[in-house]
Image (cartoon, rainbow, N blue to C red):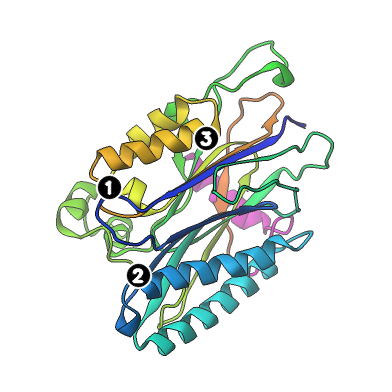
Amino acid sequence: MTTGSIRIAMTSDVGLRRKNNQDTGFAQQGVFMVCDGMGGGMGGGMGGEQASQLAAQHFAQLAAMPSRTRQDIDDTLARAQHDILDLGDRLGGVAGTTCSGLVLPQDHADSTSARSAALFSDADDQDFSDQTYVVNVGDSRTYHLSPLAHADVPATDIIPVWDAASLIRITRDHSQRQEAIDSGQMLPEEAEATIPRNIITQCLGDPDGIMPDVYVADLTGRFIICSDGLHGEVPDEQIAAIAAAHSSPQEAVDALVAAALDAGGTDNITVIVADMPLTEPEHHAFSAFRLDEGEDIGAIEDATLQTLRTIRSA
């Protein structure tokens, strides 16, 4: 059982060192994505700005669908990849963008703000899917926080108190640093000291093609979606503490952006905080699993699911 409403806030800031904002945030109708653009050639930095905006246009088309499947997501990413490759060709270089965030299987109506401020959606009277897709290409990230347990109190009576210790990074960066860590070639401390964080191994618009990660996650709790303008400046432990300290998504977003600026603000910063209805009981073992090619919500192979659960619990 789920109770409550969806509450979303989004802010994008140019930072303290950049002249233009190559990030684009998108939060409408159950699609919540952060895109972090990059580009060269004759278009210079404009290539990245246009690439992230172009990706957001494709996510808007996905958001307009009343329901979404894994195939719909794959098709959307393929069209964005094609169009951003064309953009790079027109600009005489390479244009690209990362993307990370949530795609809910069903449409949930949102009221939006032109200034990318707080977005709210009431799901009290809707059939609420209990799982969501998490999509990732590149090194923007999607995190999750669970609430602290409240014994013997109905979930409808609770203003969630978020548990900073529960922070999970659902996505894995497509970067040289992450690959060195995952392969066992380097310890995290070694990789952070020797490999720049911004050397990514794939993005939308990559001439070598893309292999997107699509996860299935429980649709409950607080999700934090951000460009590397946040997580590159602010360590995960501090992201968790700040996000957990604020009950309002907008206050959490504002505090996270302020922390990135205080840490130097060397890049554009885009953050979405999305609070989903809590399960009853509200404290449960949150789970998120990467889908294999061809797998979808409701049609995951039992053997694969068991393996992923084992890995996740470890």
Disc 1 crowd, CA 10 A, few/some/many (<14, 14-19, 20+): many
Marks 1 and 2 in Cβ contact (< 8 Å): no
Q: Is residue 295 magenta?
A: yes
Relative image position of residue 244 (x, y in whole percent): 46, 27
What's under tag 1, amino acid-wise?
Gly
For the point 55% across and 75% down, the residue is 80
Among the two numbered marks 3 and 2 on one chain, the one whose residue lies closer to the N terminus: 2
Q: Which of labels 3 and 2 is toward the front?
A: 3
* Residue 125 appears in the picture as rendered: yes
According to the picture, the residue beneath numbered tag 2 turns out to be 201
Residues rendered magenta in the picture? 294-314
Residue 234 visible in this rendered orientation of the protein = no
- On screen, residue 190 versus residue 40, left or right, reads left
Nearest-to-viewer mark from 1 and 2: 1
Q: x%, y% of residue 91?
A: 39, 85
- Quadrant position of residue 219: top right
Residue drawn at (36%, 69%) of the image: 38
Q: Quadrant of the N terminus?
A: top right
Q: Quadrant of the C terminus?
A: top left
Find disc 3 in the rendering and name its residue: 250
Callout 1 secondary element: loop
Determine the secondary structure under disc 3: helix
Q: Amino acid at mark 3?
A: Gln
Residue 124 coordinates in the image, percent (x, y)? 79, 33
Residue 301 versus residue 165: which sits nearer the camera?
165
Between the C-alphas of marks 3 and 2, the distance is 32 Å
Say which of 114 and 107 sits in front: 114
Tag 1 or tag 3, which sits nearer the N-term? 3
Q: Which residue is mark 1?
A: 265
